[in-house]
Image (cartoon, rainbow, N blue to C red):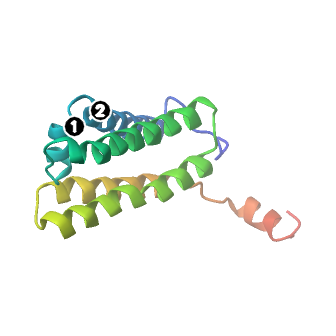
Amino acid sequence: MDHADLRRNSVLFWLVVLIAAGIIFIGARFLVAPVAGAAGFGVPADGMPTMAYLWAKGVRDIVSGLLLFLLLAMNAGRRIIAAFILVATLIPAADFVNVYLNVGSSGALTIHGGTAVFMLVLAALLWPKATARQTWVEHGQAA
């Protein structure tokens, strides 16, 4: 199997779908029920002054999930999807720091931290391993 392929019958494909659908759901929750979304995020908000951040968070999450679905639909290689997920791991990591600095200890820290760890593991699993032949060819050695 070509290491660049991510097939629909693979567990990794469906883990990418899971993270994409989950983040879209969370983003939609911020648009449909922003105060409940904020409470679930770990930084409760109430009233109109905070609605701007709630909508921005919702749109950010929806776009992040849609980008993953787009990469899957375009049959992007595993390395591209892994790189996207690796960089996107900064989002739940920053959310973790945000909640910790603004609220302190919260159950939401487990969600943000767990999401970041899950994404790091998924990115590592998606990153294709070079075969001995690929390594030789990349270094200019004859196979």
Depicted 39 relative to depicted 95: above or below: above
Instruction: State the separation of the CA atoms marked 1 and 2.
Output: 6 Å
The residue drawn where x is 34% and y is 53% is: 118
Q: Residues within 10 Å of mark 2 (few under 14, many from 20)?
A: some
Query: Residue 96 in the image: x percent, y percent?
Result: 26, 62
Q: Callout 2: helix, strand or loop?
A: helix
Rendering quarter of residue 136: bottom right
Marks 2 and 1: in contact by CB < 8 Å?
A: yes
Is residue 11 visible in the rendered image? The answer is no
Q: Nearer the viewer, residue 9 or 103?
A: 103
Rendering quarter of residue 6: top right
Which residue reaches farthest front? 49
Q: Quadrant of the N terminus?
A: top right
Rendering quarter of residue 73: top right
* Disc number for residue 134: none
Q: Is residue 67 left or right of residue 20?
A: right
Query: Residue 10 in the image: x percent, y percent?
Result: 48, 35
Q: Which residue is mark 1?
A: 34
Q: Nearer the viewer, residue 125 or 95?
A: 95
Query: Residue 92 in the image: x percent, y percent?
Result: 33, 56
Q: Callout 1: helix, strand or loop?
A: helix
Amino acid bearing label 2:
Leu
Q: Is residue 24 left or right of residue 78?
A: left
The residue drawn where x is 29% and y is 58% is: 95
Amino acid bearing label 1:
Pro
Q: Is residue 52 left or right of residue 33?
A: right
Q: Which residue is mark 2?
A: 31
